[in-house]
Image (spheres, helix red, strand yellow):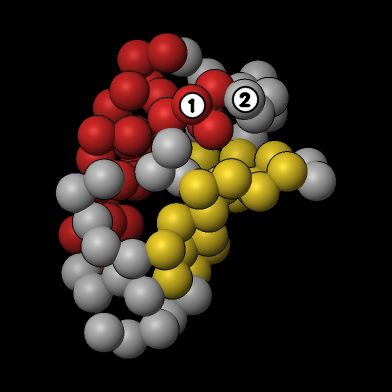
Amino acid sequence: MGDIMKSFTIFLDTVEKVKNFSSMINKFDGDFDLISGDYIIDAKSIMGIFSLNLKEPLELQVNNVENIEELEKLLKDFM
């Protein structure tokens, strides 16, 4: 596994997007953090996601993901 760290700006401004994002991200191995202001949560935690301000863009930090190209394609729906 490469320990490439990448960062993406995503929008999870509907309940549907949160559900879709959560089920998609949980198919990947690796470390995923969502950052909103001073808060950092595990992006694989749907409850954690709902604790953030979803009206604002979120920063997704990705670490140690093998198939990053596939992840990037899937993330386009949330950008």
Which residue does the numbered mark 1 point to in the structure image?
Answer: 47
Label 1, residues with CA under 10 Å away: few <14, some 14-19, many ≥20: few
The quadrant in which the C terminus is found is: top left
Q: Residue furthest right?
A: 38
Which residue does the numbered mark 2 point to in the structure image?
Answer: 51
Type of amino acid at the residue the image marks with label 2: Ser
Q: Which quadrant would residue 68 be assigned to in this image?
A: bottom left
Residue 47 location (% of width, % of height): 48, 26
Residue 26 location (% of width, % of height): 26, 45
At numbered mark 1, what does the secondary structure look like: helix, strand or loop?
Answer: helix
The quadrant in which the N terminus is found is: bottom left
Q: Is residue 12 visible?
A: no
Q: Residue furthest bottom?
A: 2
Q: Is residue 58 above or below residue 4?
A: above
Which residue does the image show at 36% across and 75% down from the upper left?
64
Label 2, residues with CA under 10 Å away: few <14, some 14-19, many ≥20: few
Viewer-proximal residue, 11 or 19?
19
Q: Residue furthest top?
A: 15
Which residue does the image show at 33% across and 65% down from the upper left?
30
| Marks 1,2: beta carbons within 8 A | yes
Left/right of residue 68 with respect to residue 3 in the rendered view: left
Q: Is residue 3 visible?
A: yes
How far apart are the alpha carbons under marks 1 and 2? 6 Å
Which residue does the image show at 54% across and 22% down from the upper left?
50
At numbered mark 2, what does the secondary structure look like: helix, strand or loop?
Answer: loop
Residue 62 location (% of width, % of height): 45, 63
Q: Which mark is residue 33?
A: none
Viewer-proximal residue, 73 or 4?
4
Q: Is residue 21 above or below residue 17?
A: below
Residue 28 location (% of width, % of height): 23, 56
Type of amino acid at the residue the image marks with label 1: Met
Which residue does the image show at 24% across and 34% down from the upper left?
23
